[in-house]
């Protein structure tokens, strides 16, 4: 079967290349406000954890520390090799667990755990086991819980991987970015293919059921040819999932990105050519294009969930746990359940002060309006299902779809004219190369976008 992207018009993609949200939430994080306080968040936890509550729970833990600085990194992270500093943070993370866990209804099962960063595997194996035990002793973790961790192969021993399995982890996401030597050196992430292979083999040997490899396109000195070589090596590994992220050069938000020289970045045409080639090669290599940055083998849960229309997006990207309330732990982490978002402070001293005072570390948050909930549903379904039936939306929210979204539908006209969207039979369907422009299509339904992008852009480019 041919790829639906073989005849993609690069000029058409350029037409739509603009800053835009990734829609891991709606409304997006720039709308979060300090007017939503830790008292508001506490009230939301209490309100949604009645004695009869049995809904599933997802947990996210943020480990901010890294051994070295990757110049492309857009994460909330801190470079340190001070083991005492890391141990101190772990102790405060346990304080937050002990503060929040008793507030969650005891019958609620944890069906998903994710460790992100930073570099969670910057912890020592003993620290991994200790944190795993703290989580399992504080929450009702389901026997079949999806437990995933982001790892950096550069400082990993086999005992790290054993410790992760001991802690219950069954999935991992491993950063690769690019196997090209010049690219690695330029972005300060030297990681030989043999190193990645060694850790990958350990994970398979020890029983990890799902392995994802992360790549980035748009880095310095990348070309279509050089990235094609990396793709061939990655496909040969045979990971269950592959994520291919668009490098977002935002030095006004991440000052360390000034270490990357703009003149070394691939030209826009080359970058788009890399993207097109990547999708075609991975599709030919047996991976299904889920959407945005994600590819998965046909039998993977993501691919199955998309076919069943149960796929979801949260702050970790695409997820199969759409019904679970998300509780975030650690500095900068975000919680989301029902109609509220709450983000912890990004400042470690403030995070520690909150824990010492026995209060939640909420810095900003947001309480969704009815309109927010309607628009979130539409955006998430389009980005996950690649189509939307109007009737169920009208029934769910008691609206007339065409009237409610009159302005949004007018914005979609250009996508229809360009053959990227088909509207008819009570359905909106994203077709062909429109799947490369999910963010742009979703932006048509965003009520806040114009006000956020008048000045300096706050989002990465969409293509």
Image (cartoon, rainbow, N blue to C red):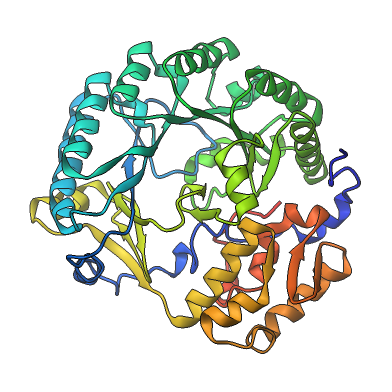
Percent from the top left, x then y, of residue 281?
78, 31
Q: Is residue 313 above or below residue 279?
A: below
Instruction: Give the residue at the far left of this rendering.
Output: 357
**Of the pair 305 and 365, the residue shown nearer to us:** 305
Q: Quadrant of residue 20?
A: bottom right
Q: Looking at the image, can residue 101 be seen?
A: yes
Percent from the top left, x then y, of residue 164?
33, 24
Q: Give the residue drawn at x 29%, y 26%.
A: 123
Q: Give the residue drawn at x 55%, y 41%.
A: 301
Say left or right for 143 vs 98.
right
Percent from the top left, x then y, of residue 440?
69, 63
Percent from the top left, x then y, of residue 231?
71, 26
**Of the pair 129 and 17, the residue shown nearer to us:** 129
Q: Give the residue drawn at x 26%, y 54%.
A: 108
- In the rendered view of the protein, which quadrant contains the N terminus? top right
Q: Is residue 310 above or below residue 119?
A: below
**Of the pair 22 and 283, the residue shown nearer to us:** 283
Q: Is residue 78 above or below residue 436?
A: above
Q: Quadrant of residue 53?
A: bottom left
Count of picture labels: 0
Say left or right for 206 vs 187.
left
Q: Looking at the image, can residue 117 be seen?
A: no
Say left or right for 356 vs 37.
left
**Of the pair 117 and 256, the residue shown nearer to us:** 117
Say left or right for 15 vs 216.
right
Q: Give the residue drawn at x 34%, y 23%.
A: 165
């Amino acid at each position: 079967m041919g790829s639906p992207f073989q005849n993609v018009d690069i000029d058409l993609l350029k037409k739509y290349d603009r800053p835009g949200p990734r829609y891991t939430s709606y409304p997006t994080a720039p709308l979060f406000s300090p007017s939503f306080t830790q008292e508001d968040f506490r009230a939301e936890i209490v309100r949604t954890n009645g004695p009869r509550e049995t809904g599933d729970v997802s947990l996210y833990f943020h480990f901010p520390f890294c051994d070295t600085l990757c110049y492309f990194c857009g994460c909330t992270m801190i470079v340190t090799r001070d083991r005492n500093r890391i141990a101190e943070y772990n102790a405060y993370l346990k304080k937050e667990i002990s503060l929040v866990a008793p507030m969650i209804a005891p019958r609620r099962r944890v069906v998903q755990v994710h460790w992100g960063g930073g570099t969670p595997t910057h912890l020592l194996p003993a620290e991994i086991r200790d944190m795993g035990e703290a989580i399992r002793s504080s929450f009702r973790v389901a026997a079949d819980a999806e437990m995933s961790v982001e790892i950096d192969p550069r400082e990993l021993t086999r005992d790290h991987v054993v410790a992760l399995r001991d802690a219950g982890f069954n999935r991992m996401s491993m950063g690769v970015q690019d196997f090209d030597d010049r690219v690695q050196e330029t972005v300060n992430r030297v990681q030989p293919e043999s190193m990645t292979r060694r850790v990958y083999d350990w994970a398979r040997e020890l029983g990890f059921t799902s392995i994802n490899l992360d790549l980035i396109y748009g880095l310095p000195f990348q070309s279509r040819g050089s990235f094609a070589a990396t793709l061939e090596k990655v496909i040969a590994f045979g990971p269950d999932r592959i994520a291919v992220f668009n490098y977002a050069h935002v030095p006004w938000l991440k000052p360390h990105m000034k270490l990357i020289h703009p003149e070394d970045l691939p030209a826009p045409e080359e970058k788009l050519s890399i993207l097109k080639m990547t999708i075609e090669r991975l599709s030919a290599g047996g991976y299904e294009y889920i959407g945005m940055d994600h590819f998965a083998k046909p039998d993977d849960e993501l691919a199955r969930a998309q076919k069943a229309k149960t796929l979801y997006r949260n702050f970790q990207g695409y997820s199969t746990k759409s019904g679970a309330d998300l509780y975030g732990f650690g500095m900068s982490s975000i919680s989301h359940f029902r109609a509220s978002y709450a983000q912890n402070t990004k400042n470690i001293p403030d995070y520690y002060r909150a824990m010492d005072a026995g209060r939640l570390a909420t810095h900003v948050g947001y309480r969704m309006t009815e309109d927010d909930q309607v628009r979130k549903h539409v955006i998430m379904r389009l980005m996950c299902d690649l189509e939307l039936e109007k009737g169920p939306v009208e029934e769910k929210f008691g609206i007339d779809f065409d009237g409610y979204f009159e302005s949004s539908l007018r914005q979609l006209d250009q996508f229809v004219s360009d053959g990227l969207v088909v509207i008819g039979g009570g359905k909106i369907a994203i077709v062909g190369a429109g799947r490369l422009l999910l963010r742009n299509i979703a932006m048509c339904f965003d009520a806040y976008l114009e006000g956020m992008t008048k000045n300096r852009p706050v989002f990465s480019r969409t293509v």
